[in-house]
Image (tube, rainbow, N blue to C red):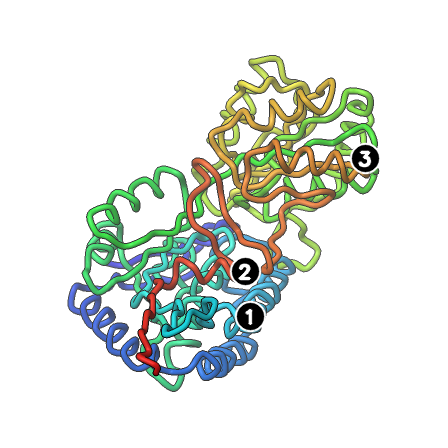
Amino acid sequence: MHLNVTNPYNQETVCSLPLADEQTIRQVIEQAEQAFAHWSRLPVQERVRIVREGLDRFRQRAEDVACDVTLQMGKPIVQSRSEFKGMLDRAEYMASIAEDSLAPDILPAKPGFHRRIEHVPVGVVFNIAAWNYPLFIPINVVVPALLAGNTVILKHSAKTPLCGKHFAEVFGSLEIPGLVANLVIDHEQTSRVIADPRVGYVAFTGSVEGGREIHRHVANRFIDVGLELGGNDPAYVAEDADLDFTVENVVDGACYNAGQSCCAVERVYVHRSIYDAFLEKSLAVMKRYRLGDPMDEQTTMGPLASRGALEVLSKQVVDAVARGGRLLLGGHRWADSPGNFFEPTLLASVPNDAIIMQEESFGPLLPALAVANDDEAISMMNDTHYGLTASVWTRDSERANRFAKAVQAGTIYQNRCDFLDPALPWTGYRDSGKGSTLSNYGFFHLTKRKSIHYRTLED
């Protein structure tokens, strides 16, 4: 059997890759386990050096990787290059903090005893990566896992398997073979890899339902799992916001990567005193998007990666209008194009019980609702089963702090959105997931604690 990858712009076949057979899967796991036995014994400084060699190899294939991203999932080539650069920035940051983050915790002196806490690797890490940011998502796990002394088996999305191939080629042939391997496998095979006793940790990025399925499989074993799942991330535009700056950034937060981001702005609440002005300015900004061939340097929005997403977005728009929302722009797919294009869409007066306000869209939709004050905004923002990010647009730092305390989400922004700082943990509340990647906390689930408790028998 083969996995066929379709270009979402022209529906042509990008590649056809054979699914791994059971013998190949066994060999990959065995090699990862053997590599771990050697890799885990190296000092952190040496692991950092070797990982950086892998990053240098990645740099040498920058344009090839960016083109593969665009061909497989439709991200405009300019954005694919930006993701490649950001991937390296994240990796370099994690390498820069690895030695300090992984150093033993030395407890206060106690006469006659030596006590410390060591952070030891978990073994073979199974990383199930998503397609929407096919470089960012795996790098958040692959590099910290390697730095911590683990080896990695990567199962990339069926939409972007060539990215998994790049990761394996770059890191899998370093000084110790098998540090990173790539498997092209189906769901049933994935569950069997999770069940293998040699796998010590599972990382998954994807849908909430997919996360539940992965968690059920992991629950049969006493290992940990990291889940980065969906979002329905809100923004609040306060009456003191810099409106031009805010509109540019909120619209970009909703439409960048055609809205296919877990932390995209998916609903916006605007203080009623500036609501009409916000809509007018947002309409003008959204009209500037240029849809077309994602390999064209001038294209600013490519097709959706999944053809089935077109129907999902259409139903959300129809539901919003049926509940009293007003369609100001877009709301339709391009019927005369073979590409999976959906127009940038602006909706006004969308009630908070509309599907678009409650469930993830994963498309270039921006529904807006006027609110009377901060308290109403907080109530609306928390009316969700997700909790990845939220943003407040205000000049008032005290207001931002009030929102940070009251809004239930893993990241709270002031005057920015849709961005990951690798110095901060990336984590979700409620159905947005569990565990953290990036920052020093990104090493936590990729290691286990070992308590060292010595009686020194000193005279």
**What residue is shown at x 46% (from left), y 40% (from top)?**
432
- Whole-percent x and y of residue 182? 34, 67
- The mark lying in front, picked from 1 and 3, is 1
Residue of label 3? 241
* Distance between the alpha carbons at the discs numbered 3 and 2: 30 Å
Q: Amino acid at mark 2?
A: Ser
Q: Going from the N terminus, do you reach mark 3 or mark 2 first?
A: 3
- Whole-percent x and y of residue 216? 25, 42
Total count of labels: 3
Q: Residues within 10 Å of mark 3 (few under 14, many from 20)?
A: many
Q: Going from the N terminus, do you reach mark 2 or mark 1 first?
A: 1
In front: 37, or 209? 37
Residue of label 1? 97
Q: Amino acid at mark 1?
A: Ile
Quadrant in the picture for residue 236? top right
Whether residue 76 is visible here, answered yes or no, is yes
The mark found on residue 3 in the picture is: none
Q: Residues within 10 Å of mark 2 (few under 14, many from 20)?
A: many
Q: Amino acid at mark 3?
A: Ala
Q: Tag 1, which secondary structure?
A: helix
**What residue is shown at x 55% (from left), y 34% (from top)?**
408
Relative height, residue 233 to residue 204 (above, below): above
Q: Tag 3, which secondary structure?
A: loop
**Quadrant where the N terminus is found in the figure:** bottom left
Whether residue 166 is visible here, answered yes or no, is no
Quadrant in the picture for residue 380? top right
In the image, taking residue 25 as reference, residue 49 lies left or right, namely right
Residue of label 2? 439
- Pointers 2 and 1 in contact (CB under 8 A)? yes
Q: Residues within 10 Å of mark 1 (few under 14, many from 20)?
A: some
